[in-house]
Image: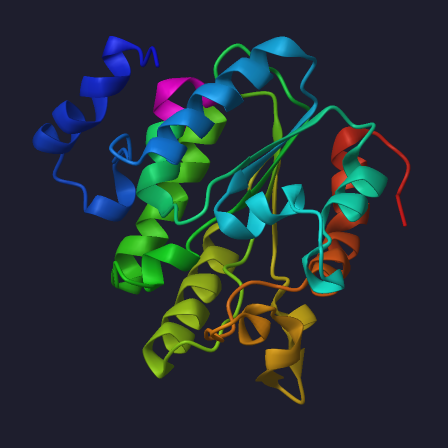
Amino acid sequence: MNIPRRALFAAPLLAAASPLPPAARPIDRLSTKWWRERHQQKLAELRSKPVDLVFLGDSITQNWEHTGPEPWQNFQPIWQRLYGDRHAVNLGYPGDATSHLLWRIANGELDNIRPKAAVILIGANNLGRLHWPPAESIQGIETVVEETRRHLPATRILLLSVLPSIRSDWATVATDTINAALATRFANTSNLVYRDVGHIFRRNHATDPAQFYDPLLKPPEPPLHPTAAAQERMALDYEPTLAAMLGDRVRS
């Protein structure tokens, strides 16, 4: 595997010199084989075809690549219907926090492309094992937006809220705090739309566990990842905004 020399050293050097919190500075996961290989595969994919639309995120975004076998895991047909002819590239990596997405941006994933639109959904993993404070996660998401705009100055950005989950009271409060801050920060930003999609996953003002597939796993896990049906509803919720950014017809 040929990892560029700059890729191996850029993040540690930046980290050593930066006063920014971990959430807002590039950190790699190169010691994880599948992550390293996915990064190389995605660089090759980005070089191999036209790119009009990129999705930047974590496992929730990466799930668009999954095909069954259960209906709640069958994301790929929805992706094909909505994005299959839009020259879209999925840059979602399971487990990534804002820091890992920043490393990927700094190491080629937004180089030499000029997409019309970029969809950003990141931050859920900041609140898991890493347990980074909301203020630091807000800074991390803001830095992701800044770096995306620096690499793609003509690209329109659709920034999605951190999705609700049922992990802990702390994570719930942190999610609400982050999203409220993002709504204020990006209320009137050129070439960027912030959209809170949390209502898709709520019922009677509470997060609905039925909208997530994690409780269906064996063993079950806390609700975090939308089912294919819930993720489709989320995509259709922001579809008019995305279609306008792409200069395209609205898909249904």
Q: Is residue 141 magenta?
A: no
Is residue 163 shown above or below 41?
Answer: below
Q: Quadrant of residue 227?
A: bottom right
As rendered, which of 248 and 7 lies closer to the eye?
A: 7
Is residue 133 shown above or below 223?
Answer: above
**Percent position of residue 151, x then y:** 46, 20
Figure quadrant of the N terminus:
top left
Classify residue 233 as left or right of residue 150: right
| Magenta segment, prevailing SS (helix, strand or loop) | helix
Instruction: Name the residue located 39 percent from the left edge and 28 percent from the top edge.
Output: 104
Q: Quadrant of residue 116?
A: top right
Instruction: Name the residue located 31 percent from the left edge and 14 percent from the top edge.
Output: 3
Magenta segment, which residues? 105-110
**Percent position of residue 252, x then y:** 90, 50
Coloration mode: rainbow
- Tell me how many marks there are: 0
Task: Say if residue 187 shows up in the picture.
Answer: no
